[in-house]
Amino acid sequence: MELWNSSSTWGSSFILVGILNDSGASELLCAMITILYMLAIASNGLLLLVIKMDVRLHVPMYLLLRQLSLLDLLFTSVITPKTLLDYLRRENSISFGGCALQMFLALTLGGTEDLLLAFMAYDRYVAICHPLNYMIFMRPRVCWLTVATSWILASLSALGHTMYTMHFPFCMSLEIRHLLCEIPPLLKLACADTSGYELLVYVTGVTFLLLPLSAIVASYTLILFTVLHMPSNEGRKKALVTCSSHLTVVGMFYGAATFMYVLPSSFHSPKQDNVISVFYTIVTPALNPLIYSLRNKEIMGALRRVLGKYVLPVHPTH
């Protein structure tokens, strides 16, 4: 069998066979994905605008939330527009360089969000368990340092994985049965022994996913003990509402990412992987801003103020 390595495939193309190609109701699914993408753009864009425009939200919690919205906006935009355009044009090819770039961006944004969610859990822990020291532990310099650390670590890991994945020789059949260029489906096309690298991907996945998840679980365990001893029912309710929103987002993100990068390959099938990839690249970015904002009185109040001031100004009657 003829092999194509990274140097010979640079000018060639992969074929992405995503969920729209495998679905029996592709037109309906395309319409749903379009609606979800528009919802993700609108809701994340509006949340970014509200946090930027309202000075009352210029606090560490909302600085981190703004970063999460930016990540969701970028993540879904790396994948969804190409998926929809490919379906409408009936052209599913992606160049070797385009595939590498898409993989790098997806891994960077996903890894950054993974670490950011852990820092957000720490922020809630400090706010609820150590409220008097909150502005010391979560001063702006610390917040920006956590954000920068998330981006740098994720981008370095993504760069290493992208370069190593794309160096393998691939078979002539360059058909990726997946929504996007990701490590697991690409390794199935490799015509070389990838078992050692698959173990490395597994170890990296455990490190990048389970360590932050352990930190989140520890933070919320301590938060739960503190909340249960709060004398005020109102304070207890506010803490639980804030934390439940974050835990919902954590559950959606880590559940999908664990399935893709921690479960052994024997548990995977192209159809399942396609469904999971749609969930964390399209559905989750659309739902995250709604989960955080609809039950948050501060964000809803800021939204009303921003809309009232800049979009729906009230003209005095004469």
Image (cartoon, rainbow, N blue to C red):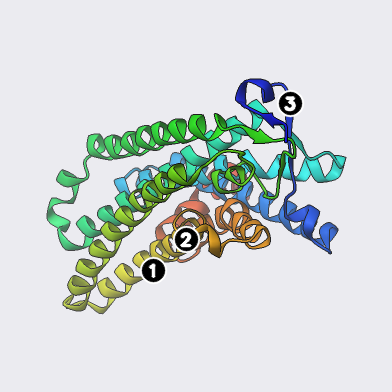
Q: Is residue 234 visible?
A: yes
Q: State the image coordinates of residue 122 (x, y, percent, origin top left).
A: 25, 54
| Residue indicated by mark 2 | 263
Which quadrant of the view contains residue 90? top right
For mark 1, does the 10 Å Cα neighbourhood hold few (<14), some (14 to 19), or many (20 or more) residues?
some
SS class, disc 3: loop
Q: State the image coordinates of residue 6 (x, y, percent, origin top left).
A: 61, 25
Q: State the image coordinates of residue 310 (x, y, percent, origin top left).
A: 57, 41
At x 46%, y 30%, the residue is 159
User: CA–CA distance between discs 2 and 3?
Assistant: 31 Å
The three-letter code of the residue at mark 2 reads Leu
SS class, disc 2: loop
Residue placed most toward the observer, 200 or 171: 171
At x 51%, y 48%, the residue is 47
Whether the residues at callouts 1 and 3 have beta carbons within 8 Å, the answer is no
| Residue indicated by mark 3 | 12
At x 49%, y 40%, the residue is 107
Whether the residues at callouts 2 and 1 have beta carbons within 8 Å, the answer is no
| Residue indicated by mark 1 | 244
Whichever of callouts 2 and 3 sits on the residue coming sooner in the sequence is 3
Residue placed most toward the observer, 99 or 82: 99
Q: Is residue 70 visible?
A: no
